Image (cartoon, rainbow, N blue to C red):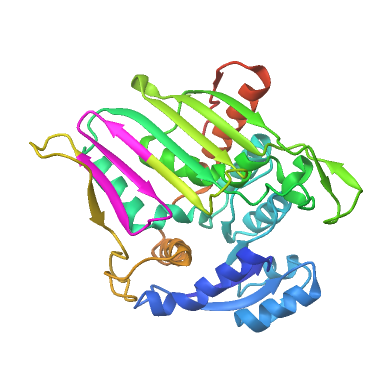
């Protein structure tokens, strides 16, 4: 089977995706399909041309429609800013293409619902980019939980912390404008930790949240006295109530001084506990409450223990950030080749939007808010 790929957007994430497609035949042998990098588009001609040259695509264009209309392109990969997702994703879905889209799926819950309604009628596969699901440590955590390792679920605590926005002279960008990004730290970092939470313990019933914007004006250009208002959150904290009285706490911040790419979670249950840190991704920490003394957390070496046909590097090798992107894209390619449902799909992305919507409603109302469910 052959899968033709069209990449829309060639910024940082576009480069990551192009690299991963080129690397897939080395990491997975054999691949379930032959991949062909057909075309890349960007609004900037210089960026699109660079994408063709660096990524090894056959052609470039500044009009993404020229990718969607081609019969030799089966998969549209969307690596655009948040405010451009819906237009491209819907067009690709209506053309019957499979779609791989960077998070978050949309600018808000209403738009996410509109995309999913189209997706439900489209024959292609649909996958959201939640690459941290594809770390062996997270895969091991899910396997343990599904086997009953935790027992009854009590607590989920998760954080995703960056520190890149502390400088008050950092110039404004689309990520700091609600009309373009849809939200701030919650939309930027939240989809990752919220997807992991949902993947491991489920979706909460209700949320109580608070947001803060620490720097309310930013220069249009670094050092300029011309400033514009920032109308998105710099940090958000959320308390959550799950079914059967389980509790959750999630914090996201782009103002966590000293943090690099600090995603962490800990899950407590009646029979055990699990914890993970993205800054130490080769290990999963587990506590087994069934064991006799001496007891304590143990480190499970997860490194690169991927199932076949993963072929490179050896399972004992330490893992890096891009490896999870390669695994995520392999998962989509395999779902297309075997005609299995992709995961996480746009339905999962919609649930993340439901959680974020409840958080923003709570921050505005000052009350606990229900996580609204959307029917299939």
257 left or right, relative to 179: left
Query: Can residue 167 be spotted in the picture?
Result: yes
Which residues make up the magenta segment? 266-287
Residue 17's x, y, as percent?
56, 68
Looking at this view, name the residue that lies furthest to the right. 226
Q: Residue at x 59, y 15 (%)?
A: 367
Residue situated in front as seen by the camera: 262 or 352: 262
Can you say which quadrant of the picture contains the N terminus? bottom left
Looking at this view, name the residue that lies furthest to the front. 258
The number of discs equals 0
Residue 273 located within the stretch drawn in magenta: yes
Residue situated in front as seen by the camera: 128 or 295: 295
Q: Which residue is drawn at 80% across and 70% down?
A: 44
Residue situated in front as seen by the camera: 223 or 95: 223
139 left or right, relative to 182: left
Residue situated in front as seen by the camera: 272 or 225: 225
Up the image or down, 319 lies above or below 33; here it is above
């Amino acid at each position: 089977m052959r899968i033709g790929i069209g990449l829309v957007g060639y910024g940082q994430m576009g480069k990551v995706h192009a690299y991963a497609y080129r690397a897939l035949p080395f990491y997975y042998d054999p691949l379930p399909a032959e991949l062909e990098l057909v075309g890349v588009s960007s609004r900037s001609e210089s960026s699109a041309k660079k994408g063709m040259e660096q990524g090894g695509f056959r052609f470039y264009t500044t009009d993404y429609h020229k990718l969607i209309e081609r019969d030799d392109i089966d998969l549209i990969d969307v690596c655009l800013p948040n405010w451009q997702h819906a237009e491209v994703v819907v067009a690709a879905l209506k053309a019957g293409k499979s779609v791989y889209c960077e998070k978050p799926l949309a600018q808000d819950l209403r738009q996410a619902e509109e995309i999913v309604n189209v997706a439900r009628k489209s024959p292609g596969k649909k996958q959201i980019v939640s690459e941290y699901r594809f770390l062996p440590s997270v895969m091991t955590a899910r396997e343990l939980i599904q086997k009953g390792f935790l027992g009854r679920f009590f607590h989920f605590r998760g954080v995703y912390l960056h520190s890149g926005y502390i400088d008050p002279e950092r110039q404004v960008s689309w990520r700091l404008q609600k009309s373009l990004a849809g939200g701030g730290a919650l939309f930027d970092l939240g989809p990752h930790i919220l997807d992991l939470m949902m993947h491991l313990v489920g979706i909460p019933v209700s949320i109580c949240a608070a947001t803060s914007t620490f720097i309310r004006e930013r220069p249009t250009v670094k050092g300029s006295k011309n400033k514009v208002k920032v109308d998105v959150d710099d940090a958000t904290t959320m308390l959550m109530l799950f079914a059967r009285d389980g509790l959750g706490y999630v914090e996201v911040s782009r103002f966590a001084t000293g943090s690099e790419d600090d995603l962490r979670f800990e899950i407590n249950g009646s029979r055990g506990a699990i914890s993970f840190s993205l800054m130490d991704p080769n290990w999963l920490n587990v506590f087994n409450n069934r064991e006799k003394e001496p007891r304590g957390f143990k480190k499970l070496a997860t490194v690169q223990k991927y199932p076949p046909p993963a072929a490179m590097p050896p399972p004992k090798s330490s893992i890096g950030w891009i490896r999870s992107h390669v695994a995520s894209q392999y998962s989509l390619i395999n779902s297309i080749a075997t005609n299995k449902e992709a995961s996480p799909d746009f339905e999962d992305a919609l649930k993340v939007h439901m959680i974020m919507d409840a958080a923003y409603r709570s921050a505005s109302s000052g009350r606990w808010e229900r996580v609204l469910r959307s029917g299939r």
